[in-house]
Image: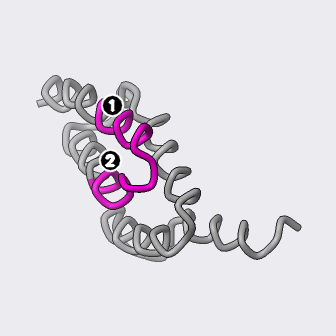
Amino acid sequence: HFGQEVADGVQALSKDESLPTKKAQMEDSLPRIRSQPQEVWVVKMADRVANLYPPPFHWDSDKIVAYRQEAITIHDALHTANAALANRLRERIARYKRYVTASE
């Protein structure tokens, strides 16, 4: 309904749930995102900015550390798409470190 370009962007942003780990899913999705226009990259960065709030109470320290590391990986892969959003993501990652420290 929205056209092939939008469908391709949504497909690139969708995780492959058949892959065994979150890390494998991230390693699969980032190259697909990078093959899309930079507007798709921005969507992924904005999504992570929006999700870097205090972690759910049921997350253990390993999950919190992994989530922050994923954010760093996303930033490193996609930061060139939009400097302002990349800076905001970097700031959120820095603030999220307090949850890593608090959970240890």
Q: Position of residue 30 (x, y in %)?
A: 41, 67
Read off the residue under disc 2. Answer: 71
Number of other residues with Cα within 10 Å of mark 1, as a class: few under 14, some 14 to 19, many 20 or more: some
Number of other residues with Cα within 10 Å of mark 2, as a class: few under 14, some 14 to 19, many 20 or more: many
Read off the residue under disc 1. Answer: 92
Asked which secondary structure carries label 2, the reply is helix
Where is 45 relative to 40, above or below?
Answer: above
Question: Is 5 part of what is drawn in magenta?
Answer: no
Q: Residue at x 37, y 43 (%)?
A: 86
Where is 78 relative to 66, above or below?
Answer: below
Q: Give the left or right position of residue 9, taking residue 63 as reference.
A: right
Q: Which residues are magenta?
A: 73-91
Tell me the CA gap for discs 2 and 1.
9 Å
Q: Residue furthest right?
A: 1
Q: Give the left or right position of residue 80, taking residue 46 as reference.
A: left
Task: Tell me the kind of residue under disc 1.
Answer: Arg
Q: Nearer the viewer, residue 23 or 82?
A: 82
Where is 103 relative to 40, above or below?
Answer: above
Marking on residue 26: none
Q: Residue at x 21, y 43 (%)?
A: 65
Name the image colouring.
Answer: one colour
Q: Residue at x 24, y 49 (%)?
A: 69
Task: Tell me the kind of residue under disc 2.
Answer: Ala
Q: Position of residue 104 (x, y in %)?
A: 11, 30
Asked which secondary structure carries label 1, the reply is helix
